[in-house]
Image (cartoon, rainbow, N blue to C red):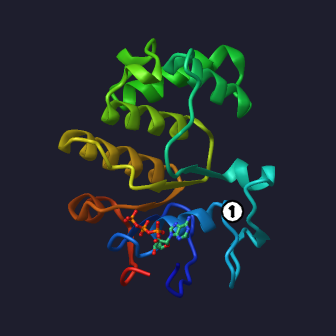
């Protein structure tokens, strides 16, 4: 399901994976986050094996791959508080951290909505806010531009560039060539459907 792949990601890299449908991008990202064990080869994080069940892996890598499960009767802000506190945020600062990420994605007005009350693009932005809020050194995103309009895609590019400017890295699959070219520090192309 994966073409032969060898890659090292350094701090402050923004690596975009491109390739046609079925070329193995999602599979690669799942291997990268320790969600899927490769049948051959290995993947390490600072020299240690990657395993999503290992808290050391999860402290570093924040994935957004596939749909995020949510609670029917929790608002967007409730979900974000849950994530913030799970990742050890101090209670007093939670409101400000959550407001910062919601404002950056221009979705402050959705804080009091339930997830089911969002359009698909709005939900995508909310799911992005969830992964951005969480502390991480490596963001792994599967086609985060999907369902976003042109303006929001540009905003996504800016947000990812800002994240990389802090020294964090991003590895993401993207079908939007212009966005990839405007955002990536490196592009890796998967050759064809597997
Ligand atoms: N759960 C699965 N079981 C069996 N085969 C799978 C599974 N998920 C993906 N595949 C196969 O693995 C190959 C790579 O799929 P993958 O989802 O990684 O592609 P992709 O590059 O992310 O595609 P897309 O651009 O459509 O999202 C494809 O041939 C696909 O059919």
| Quadrant of res 86 | top right
88 lies above or below 190 = above
Front position in the image: 58 or 163:
58
Element carrying mark 1: loop
Front position in the image: 86 or 23:
23
| Quadrant of res 106 | top left
| Quadrant of res 47 | bottom right
Give the percent coordinates (x, y) of residue 103.
Answer: 38, 24
Residue at the bottom extreme of this rendering: 4
Query: What residue lies at 29% left-to-right and 43% top-to-bottom?
Result: 147
> Left or right: where does residue 35 sit relative to residue 9?
right
59 lies above or below 152 = below
Query: What residue lies at 53% left-to-right and 83% top-to-bottom?
Result: 5
Front position in the image: 24 or 112:
24
> Left or right: where does residue 137 sit relative to residue 22?
right
55 lies above or below 79 = below
Front position in the image: 13 or 73:
73
Give the percent coordinates (x, y) of residue 48.
Answer: 79, 69
What is the crowding at mark 1: few (fewer than 14 residues within 10 Å), some, or many (at least 20)?
Answer: many
What is the count of numbered marks? 1
Query: What residue lies at 33% left-to-right and 45% top-to-bottom?
Result: 156
Query: What residue lies at 45% left-to-right and 56% top-to-bottom?
Result: 142
Quarter of the image with the C terminus is bottom left
State the residue position of label 1. 34
Give the percent coordinates (x, y) of residue 6.
Answer: 56, 84
Give the percent coordinates (x, y) of residue 61.
Answer: 64, 53
Mark 1 and ligand 1: say if the CB distance to the nearest ligand atom is below 8 Å.
Answer: no
């Amino acid at each position: 399901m994966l073409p032969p792949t060898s890659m090292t990601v350094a701090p402050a890299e923004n690596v975009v994976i491109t390739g046609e449908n079925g070329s193995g991008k999602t599979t690669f990202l799942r291997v990268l986050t320790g969600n899927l064990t490769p049948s051959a080869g290995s993947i390490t994080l600072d020299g240690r094996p990657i395993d999503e069940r290992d808290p050391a892996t999860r402290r570093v890598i924040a994935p957004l791959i596939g749909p995020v499960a949510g609670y029917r009767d929790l608002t967007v802000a409730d979900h974000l508080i849950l994530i913030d506190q799970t990742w050890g945020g101090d209670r007093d600062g939670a409101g400000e951290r959550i407001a910062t990420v919601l404002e950056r994605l221009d979705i402050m007005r959705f804080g009091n909505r339930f997830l089911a009350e969002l359009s698909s693009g709005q939900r995508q932005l909310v799911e992005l806010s969830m992964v951005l809020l969480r502390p991480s050194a490596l963001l792994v995103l599967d086609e985060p531009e999907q369902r976003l309009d042109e303006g929001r895609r540009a905003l996504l590019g800016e947000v990812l560039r800002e994240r990389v400017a802090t020294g964090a890295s991003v590895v993401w699959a993207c079908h939007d060539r212009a966005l990839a070219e405007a955002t990536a520090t490196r592009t890796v192309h998967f050759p064809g459907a597997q």
